[in-house]
Amino acid sequence: MSAESAEHAWWQQGVVYQIYPRSFQDANGDGIGDLAGIVDRLDHLVWLGVDAVWLSPIFASPMEDGGYDISDYTAIDPMFGTVADADALIAAAHERRLKVILDLVPNHTSHRHPWFVASRSGRDDPRRDWYLWRDPAPDGGPPNNWRSATDTGRPGSAWVADRASGQYYLATFSTVQPDLNWSNPEVRTAIGEVVRFWLDRGVDGFRIDMVGFLGKDQQFRDEPPPADPSSHNYFVDSRYHLNRPETLEHLRELREVVDTYPDRVLIGEMLYHSPVDLLASYITDAGIDLPTNFSLVTLPLEPEHLAAHIDAYDAALTEAGGWPNYCVGNHDMPRISIHGPARERLALMLLLTLRGTPFVYYGDEIGMSNVEIPPERRDDRWAVPQHGMTRDSARTPMQWDAGPNAGFCRPDVEPWLPVADDYEEVNVASEAADDRSHLQVVRRLLALRRAEPALAVGTYRRLIDAPPACLAYLREHGDRQVTIVLNFSDDPVTVDLGAVSGSGGTPTRVLLDTIEGSARIADGVLHLQPCSGAALDRA
């Protein structure tokens, strides 16, 4: 665990590492990652220095949306293994002092889930009301104007016509993912039983997929037209099927279930551009420990944009009694390699030195890149491309070594997605042997965070007198202070540390830099190379 503080929970002090299970390690020779493969690679995570593993969905699924379309919440999909394999993974992780977080998808199920099969079988079925069924509008069209979250294949409507019953069912994300009816207490009880099933098996918490969609207006009113279409954000401003008061009530009820088990975490996936006051409300009003903050993914990687958000976010969560969190990528967005190698390291230093819980996406520690997937090899069936890429581009096999298939699977097996062309250079084994590699920089950042209470749990204060090209801030805990200076420009900069540091005291020593040995302090002035950062303290 990171520099430990009795005043802070493990999920506040630790670093969470996200694994996309299909792509981490194939142990059974079918070209698809599995739970046994993850167990085989847990020692890498211990060596790297993370504290918790978050697994994207491993439950039974027809895989029409990469496992986020679940057909059985208490079964493991055969491609990953069995419930016994999940038990073995949890035990192996705990032996290594790693926490395990599962991905819970409670807003919707697969259309192949037995619950929905029963619900769809007839209007009189006891589970009809487990999903959201409505009669057509007077013109025969969808019941209201609620939009699909993806708009893929059916622009506009979130409703799917069911010819057999003459009604529509709500499917906010895709036609094969019908929304559960969380206003039905039987549904809430069923999901609570799912949560208990996995907590009883030892999991340390859940990341709740698309947490803001659970509650829907039971009058099914149309969303009002925007007063200003040019500035309207449908999925932030929607009143009737997103971020409803009922959602907060449902989550508080789920929190009560989780709180019967000690020391568990709830992470809630928010939408990408959620305002800071909304993030804070999910902590104070819903009991979500970490409503996900995607600002380092969505904002330009420039100091003026980042500083304004970080200051406002940190202040809002401090006032709410909450704890920040950050990420620089995930399974739905392009990898941070889109910024280039130097800025990628800069982004990771920012991620790992801000106040709050960092989420590291598998492969980012070695600088894995987005991979162009030929159409015939693509698995992502419905997602809107991001930056010209499908989500598959950021889900390719982990690059372990320079051998065939990057060590992900046997040489005679074709991996489920192509391995990146650069795997012979960009891989764990090669970079572990190079003290100046991307991997070693990330490992040193994690070690510094673990060793320094100021970085693990300390306060945050931006240092406002830094040069315009730089973002500088002070992390402080007790008598420990660490100053972070990040140069986002393509030119070298000098920083007068006496002017920047203020009451924080003037740093005299470089603890770590993103280009090893390049940052130096001379006569109270820090010299930074282009697109580089440094952590400083007083010797």
Image: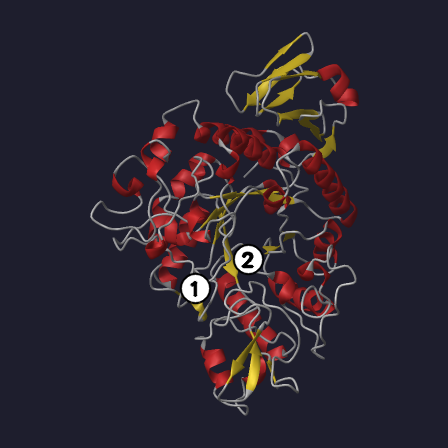
- Which quadrant of the view contains residue 72? bottom left
Q: Which mark is residue 48?
A: none
Which amino acid, by three-letter code, is at mark 2? Phe
480 vs 486, nearest the viewer: 486
Distance between the alpha carbons at the discs numbered 2 and 1: 13 Å
Mark 2 Cα shell of 10 Å, populated few (<14), some (14-19), many (≥20): many
Q: Earlier in the sequence, mark 2 or mark 1?
A: 1
Q: Which mark is residue 206?
A: 2
The spot of residue 263 in percent (x, y) is 60, 53
The spot of residue 45 in percent (x, y) is 44, 40
* Element assignment for label 2: strand
Quadrant for the C terminus, please: top right
Q: Residue furthest left?
A: 412
Q: Residue furthest bottom?
A: 124
Mark 1 Cα shell of 10 Å, populated few (<14), some (14-19), many (≥20): many
Task: Name the residue carrying label 1.
Answer: 59
- Which quadrant of the view contains residue 313? top right
- Left or right of 275, for residue 427: left
The spot of residue 48 in percent (x, y) is 45, 35
Above or below 299: residue 342: above
The spot of residue 307 in percent (x, y) is 71, 35
Above or below 348: residue 24: below
Quadrant for the N terminus, please: top right
Which amino acid, by three-letter code, is at mark 1? Phe
- Left or right of 82, for residue 453: right
Q: Is residue 118 visible?
A: yes
Count of marks, rendered view: 2
* Element assignment for label 1: strand
At a point 65% along the width and 53% down the height, the residue shown is 289
